[in-house]
Amino acid sequence: MGVGLIRNGKGRDGDAANPSGIDVRWGVLGLAALLCACADKSDPPRGIAGADADNGLAVIGRTGCAACHVIPGIDWPRGLAGPSLEGFADSPMIGGQFPNQPDVLVDWLVDAPAMAPATAMPAMPLTEGEARDVAAYLYTLDD
């Protein structure tokens, strides 16, 4: 009955019109699934309930994040060791490896090496609340 990607030597259901023996319906469904996986994900939900973006900027200044990153709102220093955080809210990835989602970002800000041991970003002396505030600030940085 031509189920799945089955080769039966004669084509689908023994039909000479499909000599490859691959059920075309499944091929079309597979292609549709791949296209859906590549759908625009540029505007995922990124709200952080109870977080204070203004306090996040203060925490960024106090902990020295700008020693490694260019961060809008921080005039000096303007570090180059890490990536610029300009437009961070529009970035789909964190550290080039993880989806840019609030819970992932908070974990990354607190202890990036636990998530990616080879990262150059150190574990930061942040409470979870401070990390949530920093994340809220970073999500204000869109292009």
Image (tube, rainbow, N blue to C red):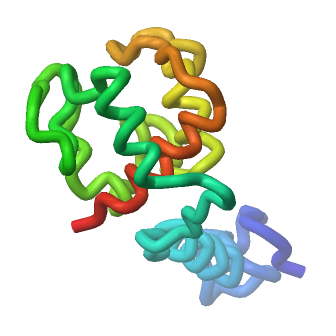
Q: For the point 41% across and 12% down, which residue is it?
A: 122
**Horizontal and vertical percent position of residue 84:** 19, 40
Q: For the point 44% across and 44% down, which residue is it?
A: 56
Of the 4 image quadrants, the one containing the C terminus is bottom left
Q: Nearer the viewer, residue 87 or 65?
A: 65
**Image quadrant assignment for residue 14:** bottom right
Q: For the point 36% across and 44% down, which residue is it?
A: 57
**Image quadrant assignment for residue 53:** bottom left
Q: Nearer the viewer, residue 34 or 130?
A: 130
Q: Give above or below for 95 relative to 110.
A: below
113 lies left or right of 83 = right
Q: Residue furthest right?
A: 1
Q: How many marks?
A: 0
Of the 4 image quadrants, the one containing the N terminus is bottom right
Query: From where the camera sits, is residue 143 visible?
Result: yes
Q: Give above or below for 85 relative to 1.
A: above
Q: Give above or below for 77 relative to 46.
A: above
**Horizontal and vertical percent position of residue 116:** 50, 19
Q: For the point 10% across and 40% down, which residue is it?
A: 75
